[in-house]
Image: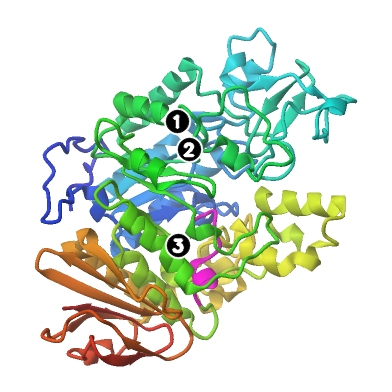
Amino acid sequence: MADSGTADGTAPDRGGDDAETLPNGETRRWWKEAVVYQIYPRSFNDSNGDGVGDIPGIVEKVDYLDDLGVDVVWLNPVYESPNADNGYDVADYRAIMDEFGTMADWEELLAELHDRDIRLVMDLVVNHTSDEHEWFRRSRRSRDSDYRDWYFWREGRDAAEVPWTAEEGPDGEAPPNDWQSFFGGPAWTYDETTEEWYLHLFDEKQPDLDWSNERVREEVFDTMAWWLEKGIDGFRMDVINLVSKPPGLPPIGADSERDTFDQVSEGPRVHEYLREMREAVLSPDLLTVGEMAGRSLSLEHARRYVGQGPDGDGLSMLFHFEHMHLDRGAEPWEREAWELPELKAVFDKWQAGLEGAGWNALYLSNHDQPRTVSRFGDDGAYRRESATLLATLLHTLRGTPYVYQGQELGMTNAPFASLSEFRDVETKHPVRRAIDRGEIDSFEAVADAVRANSRDNARTPMQWSDGSNAGFTDPDSEPWIGVNPNHGEINVAAERDDPESVWHYYRRLIALRGEHDVMVYGDYDPLVPDHERIWAYTRTLGEERWLVVLNASGEPTDVELPVGAADATPSVVIANYGDGEDRVGEAVDGAFELRPWEARVYEL
């Protein structure tokens, strides 16, 4: 692995033009070989007993991250914010939120991570700001403000002349168009000061920046350069595919099958803006991952986002959401049934679709998604087995794995008993609106689905011990969100004491990935794509070939794989059942049985 930085917290060398080319044409980069650990600071570790995680709390756990073996920390926003959306409403991009600590605390964290060869990636939230940001404060003062065109201000429409109606604003006036906020309700809020409406694709306290204004882009790039000069190693770019809005902000129309995401995703100038960003502040040796919000991202756009040539935008990788939408309806209380071949098809599509053109970011959970083992595995009888099988999948596909805090423990969804226990606006606002409109009878009527879908499942405190408040904060403090009651059995202390635990299995996978190029760069070839229980594929780099076989079900399953290994003596590289290595030499192009949620990786 490449050096992660210097012990004093200064920026590492940002070269990388002479990167090695491997036998299959892949270019070696440190961020391809890395395993990224995502920290949601509010829920990670509270150092001062106020019930909110903070930066000094992360510093206290840096050795934990080092022991696990991760290479990068992605830090969710720690900037000054009123917390309408837990930090994704930034009031000052160059200041640290008081709840989280000080800039000196952040600098100490950077130095401690770099001292252990762990890099730091910051969250870049520049589709929108907080309404408390100085730019917006100035923008809303007057229609003649120098900052007016930094945001989207429009006059309302006569409600009698449009097919949509206003939920708020002056009598008889509707919002400028029919776009809907992703958190529910119109994407426009009426401002009495200047008697116009402003656009917010998310919460009303998150007004959208107008990237067509060159001054906005220059300020964003200057802010990025400021953080890079402080020594960070890259950016995760929040909803970066939404920054180019369609000219004229046209309505969607009642008869259209499109929604607001479709209307604003991959706008006409998005690639122009990102190439401009690339020229201004980015380099190939930074880790840059773009969050591509919505359901409709095409491979054509994706290849442009991650293309490293003159026509590409130069991002290291991207987060798409195709696998995240398999089980989701349009509302927080809607769930869709899915089958394993559908999930495999999504991964197969993106493995093949970016081959030779870019790089995949691999994830099964993050701060915006339910817990991995509850969603894709079995968080009951086979919690350990399914959690380790999913870990095997995450680390043996081609791409960079992202591990969300607690995933390495097999943390599960939480049993929220009432709507009042949720903290997330994306959960609460749509449910309350639907109740007020009579679309649903009550929270209880949709509770199971809301509990399964809510982002708050990922935001319950990290479970460090079986003690009061799971060791996240002082025993007599009240955490900002409730602790999952299963912390008595699922916690860091217990996992580290058990050599067969989910934590130790993650540690072994991460170490293996650092030792074997085939696990990182090898070609991916899927097997038995239509099998309803078995997920199998090979990874090949030069003369080295691995076979991954996963029984993604709670039933014993017979396997017969046409992998052409009759003349080889397969050996088990890693397996998630304790006796896995005893099965070395078992024929892998004949029939054999996998136990429930069993995972095996063979070297052929």
Magenta part of the protein: which range? 366-377
Q: Residue furthest front?
A: 255
Q: Amino acid at mark 1?
A: Val
Where in the figure is residue 261, as x and y percent of width and height? 59, 42
In the rendered image of this protein, does residue 10 appear above or below residue 145? below
> Which residue is located at x 48 percent, y 30 percent?
93
Give the alpha-carbon distance from disc 2 to disc 3, as whole Å: 21 Å
Give yes or no for contact between labels 1 and 2 (Cβ–Cβ under 8 Å): yes
> Which residue is located at x 38 percent, y 30 percent?
274
Of the 4 image quadrants, the one containing the C terminus is bottom left
| Disc marking residue 364 | 3
Of the image marks 1 and 2, the number of the one nearer the N terminus? 2
Which tag is nearer the camera, tag 1 or tag 3?
Answer: 1
Where in the figure is residue 185, as x and y percent of width and height? 74, 41
Give the alpha-carbon distance from disc 1 to disc 3, as whole Å: 26 Å
Give yes or no for contact between labels 1 and 3 (Cβ–Cβ under 8 Å): no
Q: Which residue is mark 2?
A: 241
In the rendered image of this protein, does residue 359 appear above or below residue 216? below
Taking 432 as reference, is 296 left or right? left
Which tag is nearer the camera, tag 2 or tag 3?
Answer: 2
Q: Amino acid at mark 2?
A: Asn
Q: Which residue is mark 1?
A: 270
In the rendered image of this protein, does residue 387 appear above or below residue 40? below
Residue 235 in which image quadrant: top left
Give the alpha-carbon distance from disc 1 to disc 2, as whole Å: 7 Å
Taking 429 as reference, is 306 left or right? left
Where in the figure is residue 190, as x and y percent of width and height? 77, 26
> Which residue is located at x 35 percent, y 62 percent?
64
Q: Residue furthest top?
A: 144
